[in-house]
Image: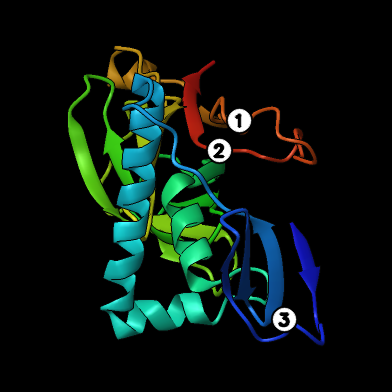
Amino acid sequence: MIRKNFNAISSGCSGIFARQVMQRIRRGQEEVCKVPVRRPGPGTPRQAEARKRFADANEYYRKVRRQPALNALYERSKTQRLSVQNLCVGDYFHAPEILEVDTSTYTGMPGNRVLIRATDDFCVKSVKVSVYDAEGVMVEEGEAFQLGDAEYWEFTASCMNIGGGYFIVSASDWPGNITSIEVPLAAAVAEVFAAPAEDVPPVRMKRAAYRSNAVRNAPGRRRDRDWQPLIVRRE
């Protein structure tokens, strides 16, 4: 394919020449390329699937064009090389990524916060967090809130869950792609020994650190000060 800006003979023209060469104007530049040829036959199953996915992606682009607010979102991100259609098709083919889930401040108490880092090739639409106890029963579910225009989202717990369990964190984008991951939680332990009231010794509070497997080995984390729940032990 040849790109040019001016030619005394064919400048400003577009179309097919001699059924071999096609000239077109694309994003303000004239391009000369071979005439596209459709391959005969239905193609392989993988080719048919790829064609269907591209057709669905272009249908999403037409849907965006019919929604002024969503179209304006893509319009703000287009460049000289990337049109709104290019952005819509690329966004349709790429699901969000969840890079980090920080549960270092979560102890199973209401008001605890969880920090999530999620990215997308265009933008993340929403992040949802579901909290399950150790028996696999859902304790609560809610939306995380984006911190400004950054790729960080914050979820605030509203229910108690001190028996451990896990999180299901899901990130979605505008075309409807969803990425979900499971983050295990450590239990907040309280050891209580049965003893007569008069024989109960003083209780000294000890600190212990619990971290999610997803962030335990994250670079730059302070291993000596990331304390979590208080463990009550009799000594």
Is 129 drawn above or below residue 216 in the view shown?
A: below
Q: Amino acid at mark 1?
A: Ala
Please identify the quarter of the rendering in which residue 102 is found: top right
Tell me the crowding category of disc 2: few under 14, some 14 to 19, or many 20 or more residues within 10 angstroms, Cα based. Answer: some
Q: Report helix, strand or loop for mark 1.
A: loop
Q: Which residue is mark 3?
A: 10
Circles 2, 1 touching at the beta carbon (< 8 Å): yes
Q: Report helix, strand or loop for mark 2.
A: loop
Picture coordinates of residue 55, whole percent (x, y): 32, 49
Q: Which residue is mark 2?
A: 228
Q: CA distance from mark 2 to mark 1?
A: 5 Å
Q: Amino acid at mark 3?
A: Ser
Q: Residue at x 50, y 36 (%)?
A: 229
Q: Which residue is mark 1?
A: 209
Q: CA distance from mark 1 to mark 3?
A: 73 Å
Please identify the quarter of the rendering in which residue 155 is found: bottom left
Q: Report helix, strand or loop for mark 3.
A: loop
Q: CA distance from mark 2 to mark 3?
A: 72 Å
Q: Nearer the viewer, residue 7 or 17?
A: 17
Dot 2 or dot 3: first in sequence order is: 3
Q: Amino acid at mark 2?
A: Gln
Is 157 drawn above or below residue 186 in the view shown?
A: below
